[in-house]
Structure formats: C-alpha cells, structure tokens
Amino acid sequence: MDFTGKVALVTGASQGIGLSAARMFASRGASLAIIDINSEGLIAAADAINHDFGTQAAYFLCDVSDEASVQSTVRKILLKFGKIDILVNNAGIYRDEAKFFEDTESMQWKRKIDVNILGTLYFTHAVLKGMIENGYGRIINIGSVAGVYGIRGMVDYSMTKGAIIAFTRALAKEVTEKGVLVNCVSPGNIQVGIDLPDLSFMNRSGTPNECAEVICFLASDKASYVAGQNYLVDGCRKKM
Ligand code: NAP
C-alpha cells in the first residue's frame, strides 16, 4: 500500500488507534496532518513520526467539538498541503466509569455527542467540498462494536457510535459517485490499556496496529470498490 502523493488527516492521533494509523500512513509515504486536543502528546507524536519516517508531519491542536477551530484547522492544512485526500475521524471519548443510563447525567451524554458525533460531522463537512472538487476522497469514520450491538453501562457512547455508522452509510449514498468513498471501522476491544481476553473468540484484545491496517486498506486504492460499509475489527466478538 503506497500513499505517496496523498495527504492524510487523522484526528485523535496522539495515542492509541489514531497514532498507529498516522504512523502507518507516514511509513507508506503519505503527507500527514495530525490533530489532537492533547498538545504534549501531539507534539511527541509528530516528533516521533518525523524522526522514524523522515516525513514532515504537521500537527494542529484542535478540539474536534469546536466547529470554528475545526474550520480554521482545515484552512491551515489546505494552505500547507493544497488538498486533503484522506480523513480519518478517529477522535472519540469513551473512558467514563461504566454506569447504567439511569445513573448518568446529561452533561456526560452531551460531551460524547459533541466529540464523537459532531466532531466527525464538523471535520467531514470542512473537507468534503474540496474532496468533491478534486473528484477524490477517502473518509474513514471510527465507530465501535458498541454502535452495532449496544453495550450496557455505555448507553450514551453506544448511541454516538451507532450514529457514526448510520452517518457513514447515508453520506456514502450522496458522495460515492463524486469519487469520495466513505467507510467506517468499528473496533472491538483494542488494547490501549489492559488486555480483556474474554471479549473475543481470539481470546485476546486487538492491537491499535490491527485497526490501523484496516483503516489504511480502506483509505487506499486497493479498496476502490468499497463504500458505505462498516468493518468490524473485533476478533469475533464473544459477548458485550
Ligand atoms: P484514545 O487512546 O483515548 O485516543 C484518543 C485521542 O483523541 C486522545 O489523544 C484524546 O486526547 C483525543 N481526543 C479526545 N477528545 C478529543 C477532542 N475533543 N478533540 C481532539 N482530540 C480529542 O482512544 P483509542 O482507544 O485509540 O480510540 C480511538 C477511537 O476508536 C475512538 O473513537 C474510540 O471511540 C474508538 N474505539 C476504541 C476502542 C478501544 O478498545 N480502544 C474500541 C471501540 C472503538 P485525550 O487523551 O487528551 O482525551
């Protein structure tokens, strides 16, 4: 998979799945814009990527839930690179203490809606016209098994990820014939912390790299006849 000449934008790229995807794009020749809310992690990620792959990854501090900041970030990226070919809407929040819905507060749901849903919509909206004008684009949204099956104790999160999957399917129906292929990757348990082997028939958590491989595949021209799909990367999920 070669991304030479392509410009990839990855949100939430300081760590975890986003960082793995960013590193993979860079290792395969892409020019890279990485976005995060965590400035320390973002600078460290960009330094490591540039050191390891000899690239010029540009980093932009941005809260994806702030529409004005998203728009100005996309303007800066377009000024620097001239185009955006690939958008990975990866930034998301889920690490609340698990609580049944009746014990949660609206503030928590609203933040997840702002980051997980609106963040994806803001970035997609900000890049889409350019992609359509260029007749080329790849958008990979990051969903979750939670959005497919629903996870108890994570009701609000499950709802936001279900929305992302529906957004992917509907948007693909508008833009596929304009050359913009939109797909979703829905991870199961990916080991960014502890291993939870009981959740999959592979008896282990997945790795961020195993998600990044599917993201890169969907962003590549190898996936030229794939649009509007949701790929589960969950090691064959056992239980929720
Ligand atoms: P992660 O380790 O928490 O990394 C996410 C990154 O996004 C962090 O650097 C985080 O910064 C940043 N971020 C959070 N809110 C942001 C905002 N408003 N604007 C910009 N950046 C923001 O996440 P991950 O585990 O790699 O997960 C990545 C994606 O996969 C998420 O959408 C998640 O819902 C989804 N997912 C993950 C799993 C899993 O098992 N890991 C499973 C299913 C789906 P801070 O650390 O400062 O918040």
Image (tube, rainbow, N blue to C red):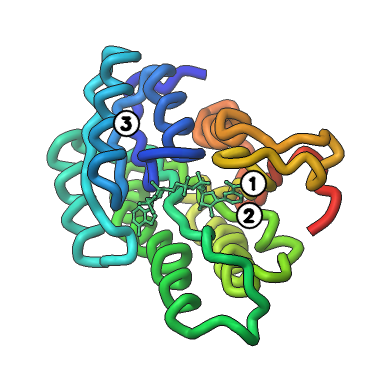
Residue 28 x %, y %: 43, 18
The answer to whether the residues at label 2 and label 3 have Cβ atoms under 8 Å apart is: no
Q: Is residue 170 visible?
A: no
- Residue 187, disc: 1
Residue at mark 1 to residue at mark 3: CA–CA distance = 22 Å
Q: Which amino acid, by three-letter code, is at mark 3?
A: Ala
Q: Which amino acid, by three-letter code, is at mark 1?
A: Pro
Depth check, mark 2 against mark 3: the one in front is: 3
Question: Dot 1 lies on which element?
Answer: strand
- Residue 148, disc: none
- Residue 45, disc: 3
Question: Dot 2 lies on which element?
Answer: loop
Residue 58 x %, y %: 22, 33
Question: Dot 3 lies on which element?
Answer: helix
Query: Can you tell me whether the CB of the residue at mark 1 lies under 8 Å from the nearest atom of ligand 1?
Result: yes
Query: Can you tell me whether the CB of the residue at mark 2 lies under 8 Å from the nearest atom of ligand 1?
Result: yes
Q: Residues within 10 Å of mark 1 (few under 14, many from 20)?
A: many
Q: Which amino acid, by three-letter code, is at mark 2?
A: Ser
Residue at 58% from the left image edge and 26% from the top image edge: 222
The answer to whether the residues at label 1 and label 2 have Cβ atoms under 8 Å apart is: yes
Residue at 67% from the left image edge and 35% from the top image edge: 206
